Amino acid sequence: MGAITLSGVEKWFGEVQVIKGIDLEIADGEFVVFVGPSGCGKSTLLRMIGGLEDTSRGKILIDGKDVTDQPPSKRGLTMVFQSYALYPHMSVAENMGFSLKMAGVKEAEWRAKVDAAADILKLEPYLDRRPKDLSGGQRQRVAIGRSIVRDPTAFLFDEPLSNLDAALRVEMRLEIARLHRNLKRTMIYVTHDQVEAMTLADRIVVLEYGRIAQVGTPRELYENPANLFVAQFIGSPK
Ligand code: ADP
Ligand code: MG
């Protein structure tokens, strides 16, 4: 569950090619971070995996099944964004359970899933509050909780911490690392922050103008960057 394979994946927006021949195997339970400068195609590639952008060429497989032409709902993945619009008129519990409720899940069942997610995220004391009565970090936890209740095979994060202040970013980074240890689910995490990449990743994928510049563990990239671009990006001495 949760293995993702990209094979010859490409994307054009009109005449402009933004993703170029991406081949990548992500193992079940792996934490993979896509890094690279703004505009290099991180979000586009993540959205293609999630099914929010179609794939111009190539294939995307999840657990060996070709999902290239499948809608997001058929992929079993969930996406967490930097903007995490919560419904202001609903409680934390209702926000977290909303998608299950909409899918026809009975109240006792969605409440149980919300309670389990709240336990993981330490949100139990806040379940009856409205989003406006939460801190930024707690709101981000609720947004992650909305994903957890759906029991996805993989989590896709697009710069989920970039709107938070520095102290909170550190706290939430540790929280996401803990979540990964806890759930043991595949996570793909997009960031332009080297520290987040180096500390969270099992493997880092460095993107440069829509191509993979290098794939490796943080240590491999640091000790043996493939080129100057990677070295500068990772901050290693080459
Ligand atoms: P990143 O997330 O790494 O900053 P993006 O994936 O958002 O980069 O964008 C990659 C490139 O694709 C950029 O040049 C961007 O302008 C372009 N792009 C992204 N979305 C669209 C779109 N819907 N239409 C046209 N160009 C787009
Ligand atoms: Mg982006």
Image (cartoon, rainbow, N blue to C red):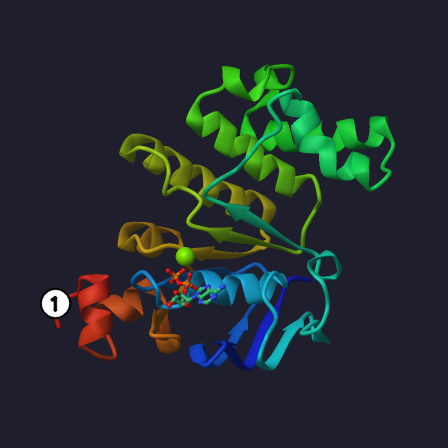
The vertical placement of 26 against 173, above or below, is below
Q: Judge whether 91 appears above or below 65 on screen.
A: above
State which quadrant residue 212 falls in.
bottom left
Disc 1 element: loop
Return the residue nearer the eye: 186 or 208: 208
Query: Which residue is depicted at the point 37% across and 33% down?
Result: 171
Where the C terminus falls, by quadrant? bottom left
Q: Is residue 106 left or right of residue 122?
A: right
Rendered location of residue 126, percent (x, y): 58, 17
Q: Residue furthest front?
A: 14
Ligand 1, seen in the image, is in the quarter at bottom left
Q: Is mark 1 within 8 Å of ligand 1?
A: no
Closer to the camera in the image, 128 or 178: 128
Residue at 49% x, 77% y is: 14
Using residue 51 as the reference point, say whether residue 180 is left or right of it.
left
Q: Which residue is mark 1?
A: 237
Q: Looking at numbered disc 1 in the image, what kind of residue is underneath it?
A: Pro
